[in-house]
Image (cartoon, grey):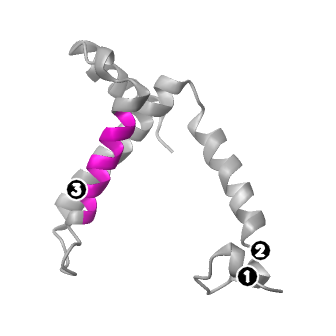
Amino acid sequence: MPTPATLQALRDFAIERDWDQFHSPENLAKSISIEAAELLELFQWGQTPDQTRVEEELADVLTYCFQMATRLGVDIDEIVMSKLEKTRAKYPVELSKGRITKYTDLHP
């Protein structure tokens, strides 16, 4: 998870440029999707992409995710752990270990 210093640096960056006015949840969701597509594009034809470019695009995705969490006033650790618990219930180890089967198709 991001450190408080990282989150503060992102907030300061946006505030210094007066960009908070553009960071609505809708705009941030669009930006997350756009940046995720740019990350995916690096793998488009099965090539091994440049690690630096992957890291930069991943940083862009994470940056917008962190900004959205801040805008919505949610605790990143809390929502990730909550979702992990729900996913853990959907995919019990004894049924899902080593498998890529969707939870609706897991059978005891």
Task: Specify whether residue 59 is in view.
Answer: no
Q: CA distance from mark 2 to mark 1?
A: 9 Å
Amino acid type indicated by mark 3: Glu
Q: Secondary structure at mark 3?
A: helix
Residue 49: image x %, image y %?
18, 71
Q: CA distance from mark 2 to mark 3?
A: 33 Å
Query: Where is mark 1, residue-wise?
Result: 106
- For the record, the magenta segment spans 28-40
Residue 94: image x %, image y %?
78, 83
| Figure quadrant of the C terminus | bottom right
Q: CA distance from mark 3 to mark 1?
A: 33 Å
Q: How many residues crowd mark 3 within 10 Å: few (<14), some (14–19), many (20+)?
A: some
Q: Are marks 2 and 1 in contact (CB under 8 Å)?
A: yes
Query: Where is mark 2, residue-wise?
Result: 92
Give the residue drawn at x 20%, y 66%. 42
Query: Where is mark 3, residue-wise?
Result: 38
